[in-house]
Image (tube, rainbow, N blue to C red):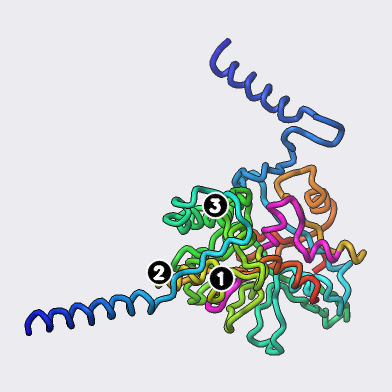
Amino acid sequence: MIRRFTGIVLLTLAAGLAFAADRVAKPVIAIDKPGRCVEDTALMRRDHMKLLMHQRDRTMREGVRTKPHSLAGCVDCHASTKTGSVLGPQGFCQSCHDYASVRLDCFECHAAKRGMAAALGAKR
Amino acid sequence: MSDAGRRGFLGTAAAALAGVALAPGIRLIDLAGARAPDEPASGKVRWGMLIDSSKCATGCTDCVSACATENGLQDTGRPKTDAQWIRKIDLKDLRSGRQHSAPVMCQHCANPPCVDVCPTGASFKRADGIVLVDRHTCIGCRYCVMACPYKARSFVHENLSAQKPEVPRGKGCVEGCTLCVHRVDKGGTPACVEACTSAGHGAMVFGDLNDPASPIAKRLKELPNRQLRADLRLDPGVRYSGV
């Protein structure tokens, strides 16, 4: 009796775990432009925010616009070829940030689409 | 050779080297103050502008529309709350009836009151005299809007979309004329000046106030000019002639 009960509990737990694993969609890491990123993948995954923050202060406070760690640089390479954006459920930035539950507020101000300048220039 | 003598010699040698012409018109380091792209903005340069109101036509808004296009300022149809980085002011002398017009934008003061009052350090002055807002630290308190005697700052009231990659903007922050810093850093001139020049008005000159050989310094020497509200001793980088 006890053994059967334990079995049921274990089964339920396992089902629950499987459910928990499926509940959050795995991030879509679709890289349309394969090749080397500005730093190693491991470093980029862990520290991209630090690189961006450093570059941001150098650019804004000192006007240095040459270093490769710029947000515009990320968008240029990683924007989806379908939507042209790093946002959206399949977007390079958003899918991972959704998975990790980290708020992504860069793009409330910054352009999330590649070639926005050209599009805007043509519209006017 | 004494230490002072050696230092003097080295300084002269370095200056001579810097001035070496690689080809006619191209120098190893431009003595006029142009910096290498990976070099931080330097205090040797003071960016400024000269606006000649005698050449500025009443009703012409070329500079204003160029600013909107360059910086992605969109017209929502609600002018009271739309961001305004540059505006045209029409002046009339009531006694003589003389009318003239001039654009007014952030005056890029040497002693900016917006920087003094900012509680977070978001409002700041770059080494080369350009006054900017760091939107990452701006909390939208609008003290700077109150402090600015030129009414040069705007608050962004609404969610924005389709910002320009070089000009990030967003709701809840204060902003103002950046002197098109993204263009200046690449050796360009502000969009308003470019528009005014290319339309043939020539009412706006941009350049380095500290360089006596720059066109703006020469014009300032020739033309009677003044700073707006010079009595406040803010030492604005934008000078006006004929107002």
Q: What element carries label 3?
A: helix
User: At 57% across and 49% down in the image, what residue appears?
Assistant: A36
Q: Is mark 2 on a helix, strand or loop?
A: helix
Query: Which residue in the structure is indicated by mark 1?
Result: A91
Residue B234 is at least partly visible in this image: no
What residue is pinned by disc 3? A58
Quarter of the image with the N terminus of chain B is top right
Choose between B98 and A17: the one closer to the eye.
A17
Residue A100 position in % (x across, y down): 40, 69
- Among the 4 quarters of the image, the one containing residue A78: bottom right
The alpha-carbon separation of the residues under discs 2 and 1 comes to 14 Å
Stretch of the chain drawn in magenta = B169-196
Q: Is residue B44 left or right of residue B119?
A: right
Mark drawn on residue A12: none
Inter-mark Cα distance, 2 to 3 = 28 Å
Mark 2 touches mark 3? (CB < 8 Å) = no
Q: For the residues carrying marks 1 and 3, which lies nearer the camera in this image?
A: 1
Residue to which mark 2 is pinned: A100
Query: Label 3: chain?
Result: A
Reply yes or no: does residue B179 show up in magenta.
yes
Residue B48 picture quarter: bottom right
Q: What residue type is labelled 3?
A: Arg
Q: Horizontal and vertical percent for residue B180?
A: 70, 62
- What quarter of the picture does the C terminus of chain B occupy? bottom right
